[in-house]
Amino acid sequence: MENKETQEAKETPAVTPEEKADRCRENLEKAIAAVKRELPGMTLLENEPMSAHCSFRIGGPVRALAAPEDVTSLSRLCSILKDNHIAPMMLGNGTNILFPDEGLDQLFLVSTEKLTGMFLLPDGAIYAEAGVSLSKLASFARQNELAGLEFASGIPGTVGGGTIMNAGAYGGELKDVIESVVILYVPDQRLYELTREQCAFAYRTSLFKKMGGCLVLSVVFRLDKGDGEAIAAKMRELNERRRDKQPLDLPSAGSAFKRPEGYYAAALIDEAGLKGYTVGGAQVSEKHAGFVVNIGGATSHDVYDLLMHVRETVWREKGVQLEPEIIILPPDYRLEDNGPAVHRNHITVNEIPEDGDSLPQ
């Protein structure tokens, strides 16, 4: 015999994707109106072209882009959005994101560009807010003769975005120097301070990327005392290697694919004869096969089609699966069936679920 809940579930008509999208747009418009009313001094851009806010220089308009002045105004903004069932997506420098040409009319972006506080703590650790660029963080460490962030001096991202993806280069990763992370958890609007162990860092991922709903506000970095000249020399060496080997003169989103276990993505792509392969205005860099660059007028579809061709070719010729390191929006993009299933990039947009995942205690 069916219980009452089962019977009610059967009687409740399923919500179609179109109805869900319409409801999201309606909620988003209410949220925008509430932000204007309750936070009149906050920078709020509407229908803002994302080509101006990402390193690929590609992307149509997002419905709303806000830039809070500080953590307090960010918390207030997120409270307003939650009241209207909207989950924001945080935006740092936009250095690893592909935005669609058609735009995103259901997305509310929150920029960390003004969250740039950084200072030394009494015990010698560095406190940095989410919007601090990794290059400025590395320079600050050098100025204070603190070693361990030399690898980050040429990474174009921010502390917030870099922490979420556990950014790294030349054998170093942020997880190696992070002591703790403070986040705002969107579902319950509470602040949490997590230790490095609780952050579940792994290669190009973390708890924050896997769960969604976690907005990184600030990070404490624990470094070793070092020699200022030696630190500066190491940074110069690594930056020179970047200039020699990477296509820094063209718009890109950094490494296009994650490093598959036991291989290097760039080598696999090069061996498959794909260096210089072009689709529209998107090209596998002739300088470094691990990069996809915008050689002029590239669309998001050019980049996507190029990424899929590279995946298909490498899988067919090498039997190795390549997973995009670039975050491709919208998050429900479909990877073509050219090899084993690839996990989607976990980005929380649209509506906030009633029950969020549990954070580690």
Image: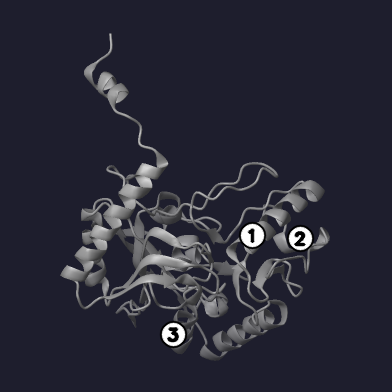
Left or right, residue 240 beside residue 200: right
Of the two numbered discs 1 and 3 on the same chain, state the one appearing first in sequence: 3
Give how far across and how far down residue 245 sits, in percent: 72, 77
Give how far across and how far down residue 102 sits, in percent: 50, 62
Label disc, if present, on residue 269 of the rendered structure = 2
Left or right, residue 112 beside residue 34: right
Q: Are marks 1 and 2 in contact (CB under 8 Å)?
A: yes
Is residue 336 in sight in this rendering?
Answer: yes
Residue labelled with disc 3: 140
Q: Are marks 1 and 3 in contact (CB under 8 Å)?
A: no
Q: Inspect the image, locate mark 3, and give the three-letter code of the amino acid beneath it.
A: Phe
In 3D space, how far apart are the residues under numbered discs 1 and 2 (Cα atoms)? Answer: 10 Å
Q: Is residue 41 above or below residue 161?
A: below
Q: Nearer the viewer, residue 55 or 12?
A: 12
Label disc, if present, on residue 323 of the rendered structure = none
Indicate the secondary structure of the residue bearing disc 2: helix
Q: Inspect the image, locate mark 1, and give the three-letter code of the amino acid beneath it.
A: Phe
Of the two numbered discs 3 and 2 on the same chain, state the one appearing first in sequence: 3
Of the two numbered discs 1 and 2 on the same chain, state the one appearing first in sequence: 1
Indicate the secondary structure of the residue bearing disc 1: loop
Is residue 360 in sight in this rendering?
Answer: no
